[in-house]
Image (cartoon, helix red, strand yellow):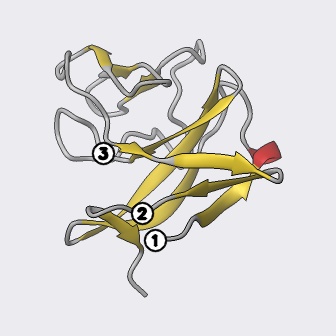
Amino acid sequence: MTELWICTSEELIEGGKGIRFPLTAGDHDTSGFVVRYGGQAYGYLNRCAHVPIELDWSPGEFFESSGLYLMCSTHGAIYEPDTGHCSGGPCKGGRLRVIKVTEKNANVYWYPDDYLRPARA
């Protein structure tokens, strides 16, 4: 399947607000998100590895106050933004589901797979 546009590259600020985008995961309508960390864009399914709930505090607020880790707003699980690995909290050792993303021509795109598909109309 082809790439799907998420946002412009300039909308992603290092350690700042992430961009949510709609998708279908299995049979569930949900969202994915993309953040910038270490100068690169990283995409994940917006679902905590501990309990299947969305991570963000308010739309796009995924980083904790230092801007170094992603944090689940409900249980405080801490994730490494470049790998999705849970390094602290109730799901330690788990990980977020990666969504393949690329940046080209000053835009960020995601790639559907067998589980993650474009949002249903």
Q: Upstream in the sequence, badge 2 or badge 1?
A: 1
Residue at image coords 37%, 33%: 73
> Mark 1, residues whose alpha carbon is within 10 Å: few (<14), some, or many (≥20)?
few
Front tag of 3 and 1: 1
Quadrant in the rendering for residue 121: bottom left
Residue 11 x, y percent position in the rendering: 77, 46
From the viewer's perspective, is 108 left or right of 43?
Answer: right
Q: Is residue 87 above or below residue 33?
A: above
| Residue lying farthest to the bottom in this orientation | 121
| Residue lying farthest to the front in this orientation | 1
Residue at image coords 56%, 44%: 34
> Mark 2, residues whose alpha carbon is within 10 Å: few (<14), some, or many (≥20)?
some
Which residue is at the front of the view, 4 or 65? Answer: 4
Q: Upstream in the sequence, badge 3 or badge 2?
A: 3
Q: Disc 3, disc 1: CB below 8 Å?
A: no
Pointer 2: what residue? 112
Pointer 3: what residue? 47
Identity of the amino acid at label 1?
Met
Which residue is at the front of the view, 61 or 23? Answer: 23
Pointer 1: what residue? 1
Q: CA distance from mark 2 to mark 1?
A: 6 Å
From the viewer's perspective, is 19 left or right of 11?
Answer: left
Q: Disc 2, disc 1: CB below 8 Å?
A: yes
Q: Is residue 38 above or below residue 40?
A: above
